[in-house]
Amino acid sequence: MSWMARVRFEPSMCSEVVTTGGPGGLSMALGDAGRAFVVADRAVLRLHGSWLEAALGPRLAGIFAIDADERLKEMSTVSDILDRMRSRSIRRDDWVVGFGGGMICDIASFAAAIWLRGVRLALVPTSLLCMADACLGGKTGVNFEGERNQIGAFYPAGRIVIDPSFLGTLPAREVRSGLGEALKTAIVSADRELRDLLLGPRGTDDSGWVLGLVERCLRAKAAIVSEDPLEAGPRMLLNLGHTFGHALESAGGFELAHGEAVAIGCITAARIAGLMGGDPCLAGEITSIAERLGLPVGAPSTPGRALGRFLERDKKTSAAGRTWVLPFAWGDCRRVLLDATEERRLLSEARRGGPAH
Ligand SMILES: NC(=O)c1ccc[n+]([C@@H]2O[C@H](COP(=O)([O-])OP(=O)(O)OC[C@H]3O[C@@H](n4cnc5c(N)ncnc54)[C@H](O)[C@@H]3O)[C@@H](O)[C@H]2O)c1
């Protein structure tokens, strides 16, 4: 006789995003119960530590500060964070709060996901890239031996607190990096309002413009993630620009900001799509928006062999080849499997400038 059991695991995890005019928003979002252990960007803490203190007061159970250096987004740092959480006796009903950009929020979220098999998580994104993209969707993780986000888990933050006032101290290059990721979302979602925001004037009240942009990006991402939280299908389209972008970032020792690499990756992917019958004008349109936003549009001269090595480690690589996300038109992104020979040919043509039009 055999016995079988079926257990249905359906974690009812839901992220609530609140926009706030100040620290009171975080304090309200966390509710009354639980202490807060903060994983913070050291630079952001120096600039905005008083915001955090005002938000958390006596419930603050400890702060682990790290430099936002991609090379520190590694397991050894996670281990140090967990060690500190243990010494502060962080329990399941406490909160881990990520306070910084995408690098900090990714690593804080991963620590929250694995400590005691999951403690409550809140994120306070302080970079535009993190506000408009990284804070939402539950992807947590760290790099492994210099390769992007090779280790991780899906673990969405219960609360996300957006306060555009942090952007007042964000360096201009990092603002542009965030716009690179927003451009990717505009291509995937074909959200006309988002494209208009990217193309239009920022006006005198930057914070209204930022909030509008962040809202459009998060709404577009929320719709896709809600349909496919564990990235079994449609969510993969949000990886547009990341296959080539991640390889460029890794091969260049993280000299490129993430959103800069994604923008170059989107242009490259659009050129490849153009070579495969996609809209031949799209790559040019994306390039001119990226230029207007002050983003780099050409890949740095990275040796093909170094790029190839990092492309090989892309999570979408299989025995049959590598699956690229290619934009055939605004809102028409497709997953396309390219075998090694085809990929080499298309990529070298795309890097030379793509289809003539
Ligand atoms: N989880 C996801 O879905 C997801 C999505 C996209 C990107 N990411 C990850 O996000 C990271 C990139 O995010 P990022 O661009 O925010 O990088 P980051 O966290 O490295 O921040 C970029 C820089 O901005 C600084 N900074 C942040 N906020 C600031 C502020 N308010 N004032 C002054 N300086 C500030 C940081 O100190 C850092 O120097 C990468 O690790 C990437 O893998 C994750």
Image (cartoon, rainbow, N blue to C red):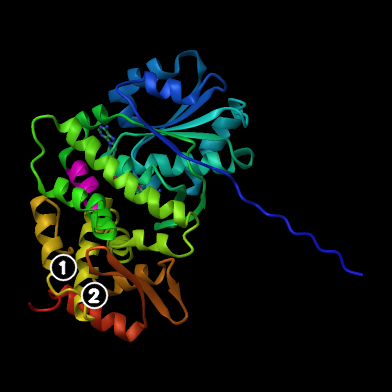
Apparent side of residue 301 relative to residue 160 in the rendered image (left or right): left
- The dot on residue 282 is 1
Q: Quadrant of residue 287?
A: bottom left
Circle 2 — which element? helix
Q: From where the camera sits, is residue 107 visible?
A: yes
Circle 1: element type:
helix
Magenta range is: 173-180
Amino acid at circle 2: Ala
Say whether residue 176 is magenta: yes
Residues 60 and 85: in front is 60
Magenta part, dominant SS: helix
Q: Position of residue 100 (x, y in %)?
A: 35, 35
View quadrant of ligand 1: top left
Q: Give the image quarter of residue 227.
A: bottom left
Residue with the mark numbered 2: 273
Image vertical order of residue 219 relative to residue 89, above or below: below
